[in-house]
Each structure stands twice: as C-alpha cells, then as structure tokens.
Image (cartoon, rainbow, N blue to C red):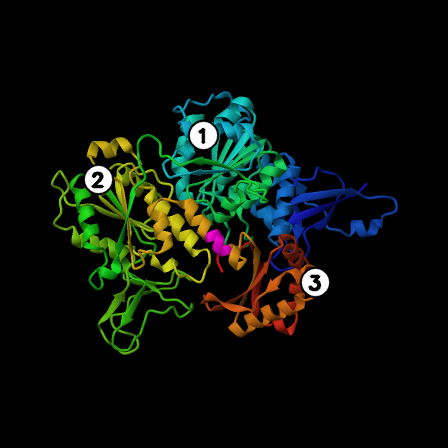
Amino acid sequence: MNWRFDVAVQTPAHSALGDVLSYASPQPVAPGTLVRVPLGRREVLGVVWSVQPSSPDEDVAGLTALKPVAGALDALAPLSESWRDLVAFAARYYQRSLGEIALAALPPQLRELSAVQLARRLKRQAAPGTAATEAPRGGPPPSAEQAQALARFEAEAGPFLLFGSTGSGKTEVYLQAVAALLEREPGAQALVMVPEINLTPQLEARFKDRFGTAAVVSLHSGMTNPQRLASWLAAHGGAARIVLGTRMAVFASLPSLRLIVVDEEHDPSYKQQEGARYSARDLAVWRGRREGAKVLLGSATPSLESWHQSRPAEGKDAGGRYLRLEMPTRIGTAALPAVRLVDMGRQPPRTVLSAALLEAIGQRVARGEQSMIFLNRRGYAPVLACGDCDWKSECPHCSAYRVFHKIDRTLRCHHCGFTERVPRACPACGNPDIAPVGRGTERLEEHLGELFADVQRPDGSPVRIARIDADSTRRQGALESQLAAVHAGEVDVLVGTQMIAKGHDFRRITLVAAANPDGALFSSDFRAPERLFSLLMQSAGRAGRDAAYLSAQGSTAEMWIQTHHPQHALFEALRRHDYPAFARRELQERAAAGMPPFAFQALLRADARTQEAAQAFLNAASAAAQGLEGADLVTRYPAVPHAIQRVANVERAQLLLESASRAALQRLLAAWQPVLHGLRREPEGKGVIRWLVDVDPHSI
C-alpha cells in the first residue's frame, strides 16, 4: 500500500503553490513528523500535515506519479497537534503560507540535518527529565500587592493583564507563578517572553538562580544556530521546563505548556516587521486558550488594546476578556520619580540641555550618583548640510537623509545601509564649510563631555560619560560589558536610545532626562502618542529603583522632560504617573475616530520600480475586491506612498483597509489572496517586485 503525505514546506514567496504539497511514501508516519522531500532541484525539510492511505478505487498511477519522500527524521517526536493548530491559525490570520510559518518556527540548523545526523545530535542532548529533579530555590516573601495578584492568578482562569508600576516587582510575580506551577505539576513547562534580546541575559540569570541551569533555556535570534537547536530540542523533548525568549519563542515546541508570560506586553517589538508579520503577544493569548495554558501579560504601560480588553464590566458593557491585576506601588519604600517639565520655549535659542537640568546632573555627579539621558536618535547628527547651496546628505537610494557618524567620519543610511566617507567639501558647490544639523546620541555624548570637563566625582576623578545605542553595541559582547560598567558604578552619565529606556534594573540612577521627545506628539501615526507615553514612563522607571540607596544618599529620584509643549495632556498625565488617565483620553479619541481597538485594520503593501506602478497595483487590487465576501463591511482607502517611500531604490506604497468587524475583514482578506496572485500576471502587476498583507499593523 502507498501513502500520500501532505507536507508543509517553505515554498517561494508569492508562488501560489498552496499550503501543502503532496508526496508518496510506502510507509506511513504520524502527522507532525519532520521529513526531507524534493522541491525543484533541492531537497528541503517539511512537516507532515496529514497522511492518507491509497484505496482500491484511487488512481494509483496518479499517486505513484508523486515524488517520493526522501526520508523521515523519525528519531524526533512528531510536532503536536496543538503546535500545528497554532501554525495554521497564524498562517490563516496573517495571510501567509502554512509552510512559511511552520519552517520559520523551526531552528535553522534542523533544516540541514539528515536523519542520521539528528539521531547523533539527540544522543548528545541531556537526558529528558533531569531538570525536574532540581527543586526551585526560595525567593523573597511577596509584598501584599504581589500576594494578592498571585492569589487571583491561581484562583481564576484569565487571561490576565498584570498592570504594575515600574519597580513594583512584576518579575518576582512571574518567578513565583512559575515556581507554583512546577511544584504543583513537576513535568509542566512555562514560556516567558521579553520584547528584546538585550533584556534576555538578566532575566535568564534570575530564572537560573531560582530554578537551576538545567531547567532554563533561551530562544532568540542572537544565539548561534547550534545554541538555538540545542534549546529547541530541550524544549521539544521536555528537558527544559522554562523557555525564555523573544517573539520567535511563541512558536517553540512545548508539549507540556501550562503557563505563558509576556513581559512588557505593550512593546512594539512583539510585532514582526519582516516576512510573516505576526504579533507574538496576540498569538500567545490564542495559544494559551488552545492549549489550556494560563496567560499573564505584564506592563507598567499596557497597550491600549490590552487595557481595553481588561476593562471591568460597567452598566451594559460586559467588560473585556482579560482580568486586570494591579500593583501600583513600588517594592519597599521607593517612590516613583518626580517628573519635572522644562519649557524649551523659554530657553535661549539652540539650547540643547537647559541650565537647570545640567545643574541637577552636576549635583548627582558630585554625590556619586548616576544620571541617564534618553535621546531616540543615534549617530552624531541626523543631517549634514551646506549653508551656501542648501545641499543635504540625502541617500541616493532612499527618500531619507544619511546620518552623520563622527566617530568613523561616515554618512550612513539607517534604512538601506549605504555608507560613504564624509566629503571634504560640499559635493554640489564645493563649499568646505559643511556642518551637522540636529543632534544624535553621539553628538550629545560629546557635548556632555565638553560641559562637564571641569566637574569632578567625589574621589576627584573626571566625570565618566558612556553611550549605549545600536552603534556602540555592534561588537559581540559590547552591550553586556557596557551594562556591567553601569551596574558597577563606573559610569556617571549614560546617554542612549530606547535600548536603555526599558527593562534594565539600574540601582544607582537617580535622574533620568528626555532631551527631545516632542516629535511624536503630532505624528501622522495615531499610535505615536501611545508609544511616546510608554517610552517616557519606562524611562522614568529606571530612576530611584533602590530606596535604600536613595535614603543613604539623601537624594530623590527625578525625571526631567525638555519640551516645547509642557501643557500637553500627555505630559500632564505623565507628571502624575497616571496611565489610566492617559489611556482613558486616548481611547475616547480612538472611539470617536473609529480606530483600533474599536476597529480592525490591515495594510496591503506593494514594492515596485516606480511609485506609479506600486500605486496602480494597489488601486487595481482595491477595485478587484469589490463584490468579494466581506467587502461591503470593509472600507478601502486610496493607495498612498509610505512615509519613507523609497528604500534601496525600491518605491513603496500602501493601501489601508478598515472594518468594525474583524470577521468581515478576515473574510475579505482570504477571498482577496487569489485575486492578488492573479493581478501579478496582469498589466497592473507589471513592475511590482513584491506585495504583502500586514494584518493589525503597528505603524501606518
């Protein structure tokens, strides 16, 4: 008897080959088994999605014409039905192929191994179950708020939103929730997610200290391929009880998953911005419901979607699907930092840092305390310009300026990566006097060095200023060593981008300043104020985390904000650390405008050789959507260029779809897929390089 395997493989983008390809085999295997199959001239890894035996009535010639399966990696237990359901849901909801999601979720090295190589690798792995023999170490007794949150978490089903101020001890709640789970069910597994790779090491250290090294593994793109494979195999085989990871970890194979934690759930990093544009936070909630695992989302500044979903019942409103747990107080006697607003309209022209802020930083240096200045713009200056002919350092391949990096004398495009040496004179008119315009973290670091050149630390040594951003941390291990220097007290003033604004437990920082946050106040992106408030609240949370240190220093924690709009409602809410007030106002505005979370959106994006070709494709696609299922309940807006419409000589445009019904939007998107594939072959598709659908976009 022959068998037909339907296999999910990573088919080429926009190939329209369908979700699965069929292959023949003389032997059956369980669905979820990894197999190697021919695809074109290559042999690739695939996941068996279904298996059907041939029947006497079947056209055997047709079955034998199928290409045979090359081999099964049967030393590995099949991927579970619940894992396959997660992949299928993600592919369906985010409008991608099944194989693209499934194969991207597997460690890259697994795709290259033969059955023999995999069997050899599995023998080298630690024996399953060793992690369960190590009892968790005890943690500190929970505060009253932590104990109340944990009690409700244990007693109710969730999903839960843990709304805790910065420094309230959310991580300890995660640790104790995992400890209670493993004590109750030693074979259970927990998934703990963080938004960024640089937050993983400190969390990993805390979990390993509590649960032992063997029980904990990490999964993120910063690991080597062998490391990722080892962690994935440990999770898949059940040896790892706790998996820590970034958004990719939401697809980890965890056969005994009972708990999912999403820390800093508001963070935009949970939304994938390349390929399959999934939201790991939203998939975590779906996965928890599918697998019967409890889900705990945590944040000091929750996303407005999660905040709305956790609203209590009121009147005719039945409330949201999530249960809100609140921890408004910092651990110990530490108070939230006082927020001070500096009206930059009253400062002398071209003031970078106000005199009052500089004096406050100087006082902290004199006491041996640390300060942090946040500026979300790396490089020395955003633009290099000529005052004679108005030449600016535009990128020849993008509709953006190249940033001036003084440290290596380069002009670097942060979109396509194009880099050149700084010209000796203006390329347009020959004027040798070309100058930087605006400030980035590199220039701010230099400026602070000049301002504090004559200031001394308590021991008489000079002030030490450090910068942490994507440029200063390029080398392997650079971020870890720089963070270690801050923790050790070797840095007096830390300058950086949002990399330093969230998640880090700096014990000696007593002052945090935002140098220039106004840009997001009036952005065309309706989510910009939400992101700004979150970033500033998270930044403020880095100050004054150690009450004992503050008391010993006789100091107080402060957050300084330099703005031209001190009366703005966002800053008023920030001064009171009043996220609920900010959220209430934003949600009222979004409800009035019919925007998420009161509506659902998708973007159709197109890249082409010309802007005209991109928009022509999008407008033709919009016209072709008329009459499709769900179209009457979905608003389709005209095609427009991206905010940065050209990147690497590719023109980009987008078309927004919006509906009050998520189901109607999904029905239209599903019916639209074959239409979009067909349009690529029509005159309207000429010149289009690629297109993609972005469901629940984070930026428009």
x, y percentage for residue 231? 50, 36
For residue 521, what is the image quadrant? bottom left
x, y percentage for residue 42? 62, 53
Dot 2 lies on which element?
Answer: loop
Asked whether the beta carbons under mark 3 and mark 1 sit within 8 Å of each other, the answer is no
Residue 369 marker: 2
Pointer 1: what residue? 175
Instruction: Answer with mark 2 or mark 3, whichever residue precedes in sequence.
Output: 2
Category of crowding for the residue at label 1, using alpha-carbon neighbours closer than 10 angstroms: few (below 14), some (14–19), many (at least 20):
some
The residue at the far right in this view is: 57
For residue 626, what is the image quadrant? bottom right
Instruction: Answer with mark 2 or mark 1, whichever residue precedes in sequence.
Output: 1
Q: Residue type at mark 3? A: Leu
- Residue 149 located left or right of residue 120: left
- Residue 625 located left or right of residue 593: right
x, y percentage for residue 163? 45, 39
Dot 3 lies on which element?
Answer: loop
Q: Which of the image's four quarters has the N terminus?
A: top right
Above or below for 19 versus 401:
above
Above or below for 246 versus 674:
above
Pointer 3: what residue? 628
Dot 1 lies on which element?
Answer: helix
* Main secondary structure of the magenta stretch: helix
- Which of discs 3 and 1 lies nearer the camera? The answer is 3
- Residue 174 located left or right of residue 484: right
Q: Mark 2 and mark 1: span between their CA atoms?
A: 30 Å
Instruction: Answer with mark 3 or mark 1, whichever residue precedes in sequence.
Output: 1
Q: Residue type at mark 1? A: Leu
Identify the residue at image location x=48%, y=29%.
150
Q: Mark 3 and mark 1: span between their CA atoms?
A: 49 Å
In the image, which residues are magenta?
586-590
Asked whether the beta carbons under mark 2 and mark 1 sit within 8 Å of each other, the answer is no
